[in-house]
Image: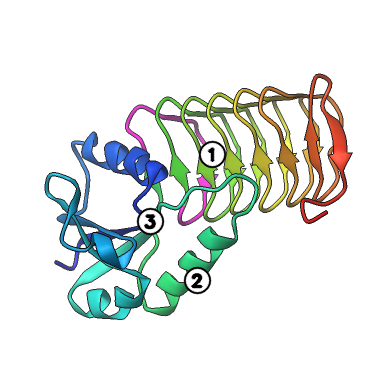
Amino acid sequence: MADGLLLLGGGGHCCAVLDSLLSDPNCPYGKIAVVDAPQKRGGELFPGVPFVGSDDDLPRLRAAGFAFAFVTVGSVGDPSARIRLTQTAERYGYAVPTIVDPTAVVGKNVRLGSGVYVGKRAVLNFGCTVGDGSILNTGCIVEHQCAVGSFCHIAPGAVLCGGVRVGDGAHIGAGSTVLQGVCIGAGALVGLGSAVVRDIPDCTVAYGNPCTPRRTSRAD
């Protein structure tokens, strides 16, 4: 089972990632299983995809032959759980792969970090870069030469026009559009359906058309 893959987190985002894996005729993993709350152990998320334990079982499961782990906890503005789980998996010796849905379009000179998920019909155009652990969700568009940081979430249907910069841990809400060349600060949260026409500072919640900063810190 050296080619076994653990999905860390058994909620809705896990279902989306699992669907991408099961839709791929070239899926490289001999067995897929899910780690979640202890009480789910013994059940199945999907036929043939069992719940095999909780985070506490990661050392045992690594020794049992699972070599890969992928974080399937979603995030809306706070990626701390995703970061923690990634660090835990790496500490126990798991390889953290990148998963790209077979319907996604990934252009030339695109660089994806480890632990990235590219969802159904997402488009990543020429020369864009994506840092570790980021989610590029269903139908989003990341245009040419954009730079998306680590542990970001580009939500379903969001559009980053050419040359946009997105800082680590930022969230771009569903259906939002970011004008070419705009910079979204680290830890910023852009609300759904926003039209972003100017830079958004770090750790700022912003939304609307035009997108306007509403407060300076999500901790406020």
Q: Which residue is mark 2?
A: 87
Q: Is residue 48 left or right of residue 26?
A: left
- The region drawn magenta spans 101-115
Choose between 154 and 27: the one closer to the eye.
Answer: 154
Secondary structure under tag 2 reads helix
Q: Is residue 179 left or right of residue 15?
A: right
In the rendered image, the quadrant that contains the C terminus is bottom right
Question: Measured from the top left, where is residue 192 in percent x and y?
Answer: 66, 28
Q: Is residue 140 magenta?
A: no
Q: Residues within 10 Å of mark 3 (few under 14, many from 20)?
A: many
Colour convention of the picture: rainbow
Q: Quadrant of residue 97?
A: bottom left
Disc nearest the viewer among 3 and 2: 3
Question: Measured from the top left, where is residue 164 in percent x and y?
Answer: 73, 34
Q: Which amino acid type is shown beneath numbered disc 2? A: Gln
Secondary structure under tag 1 reads loop
Q: Which amino acid type is shown beneath numbered disc 3? A: Gly
Query: At x 16% / y 56%, what residue is drawn?
Result: 31
Query: At x 23% / y 68%, what residue is drawn?
Result: 66
Instruction: Tell me, for residue 9, which label it has, or none.
Output: 3
Q: Earlier in the sequence, mark 1 or mark 2?
A: 2
Q: Which residue is mark 1?
A: 109
Secondary structure under tag 3 reads loop
Label 3 – label 2 distance at C-alpha = 14 Å
Disc nearest the viewer among 1 and 2: 2
Question: Measured from the top left, where is residue 34 in percent x and y?
Answer: 27, 57
